[in-house]
Image (tube, grey):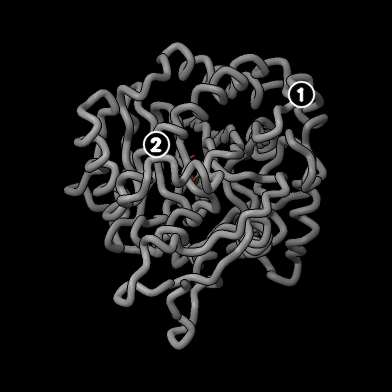
Amino acid sequence: MVITGAEESLTGNPTNYDRLQELKAFDDSKSGVKGIVDAGITKIPRIFVRPPEDLATGEPTDTHFTIPVIDLGGRRADVVDGVRRAAEEVGFFQLVNHGIAERVLEEMLEAARGLHELPREVKAEYYTRESTKKVKFRSNFDLYKSRFANWRDSLYCVMGPDPLDPQELPLVCRDIIIEYSNQVHKLGITLFGMLSEALGLKSDQLIGLECAKGHVILSHYYPACPEPELTMGTTQHSDPDFLTILLQDHIGGLQVLHQNRWIDVPPVPGALVVNIGDLIQLISNDRFKSVEHQVLANHMGPRLSIACFFIPHLYPSTIIYGPIKELLSEDNPPVYRETSVQDFIAYYDEKGLGENSALTHFKLQKGNQEMRG
Ligand SMILES: O=C(O)CCC(=O)C(=O)O
């Protein structure tokens, strides 16, 4: 693999830098960021290096504001109210007492580590960018579209709505992914009921709109980085789904953009992080916020996180999504045009991660915001 280091990228002749060739060399290695780290590098390859202006977006970290923590074991009306406020004001909250046993959370993180730390040749069997594959290991889904590669590898598994053949999952994490997937799906159904009520709708309305119809589990692995100040674990972005439930380990690094300041999402033992996705912002007509977030690279690591995206990916859904009509009025006309999940995802994937929200593309022009009957 010929990938050059940060030193050359900052001081070398830029005409010597064939970015596409270096991306291909990295991709063809099928060993991800972990493979580079295992090779013993001390300077990060320049496909990962960002100029300072691309590292410092937003204002400095705000240490006064904290992400809300919601106790799912509380009185239902209080929980729904907490969910409503968090969804409207922050777009993120941490959830405790959610019903998924700590044993399951710990085993899930341990198995994800086991997967990413398998020998290169075993992981390479799963390494692919083929769009129809339900289980794939890869580094940077938008490798050839983004300006800078992220310091992370991921295992991507489409868990529903059609059941996945367990044999497709790597043995090291097979049973626990299935168990975690079932439990997090149930939790998602509970949360969609609460989000419906928080919008003043019938509690089954979002489920009726198939918001929990499909889910994808992503196991992210962020190796320790020798030069974390030059790169990112995950670029600033919002999520292309209805809702995300995230399990993070103890390392930290996840940050949320709130009023143009980065807020840390500190690891809370046993908690899950929940965030509103772009498609809920669209159907709630901007009432609930799909907020940008990022992950810092770190000298410490590896960091592990397990994201569950509620989205019927690879499923031929026929539902067309637009702002829910019960939420609209003369004073609150639709802000977005209608779209299918497939079109939304195709647009997001083409665009890649970044601060330019996919939602902008689906916004109606001012003159076209008519009420639908
Ligand atoms: O690893 C994390 O904490 C966040 C991952 C994330 O933002 C994503 O999967 O979209």
Q: Does residue 248 appear in the picture of this structure?
A: yes
Residue labelled with disc 1: 165
Q: Which mark is residue 191?
A: 2
Q: Position of residue 131 (x, y in %)?
A: 77, 48
Confirm if mark 2 falls within 8 A of ligand 1: no
Q: Earlier in the sequence, mark 2 or mark 1?
A: 1
Q: Is residue 186 above or below residue 246?
A: above
Q: Which mark is residue 294?
A: none
Q: Position of residue 221 (x, y in %)?
A: 57, 33
What secondary structure is found at the residue carrying circle 2?
A: helix
Q: Label 2 amino acid?
A: Leu
What secondary structure is found at the residue carrying circle 1?
A: loop
For the residues labelled 2 and 1, the Cα–Cα distance comes to 27 Å
Viewed as shown, does residue 361 lie left or right of 142? Answer: left
Q: Does residue 47 appear in the picture of this structure?
A: no
Confirm if mark 1 falls within 8 A of ligand 1: no
- Image quadrant where one finds the N terminus: top right
**Residue found 43% across the figure and 72% down from its top:** 335
Q: Nearer the viewer, residue 328 or 34?
A: 328
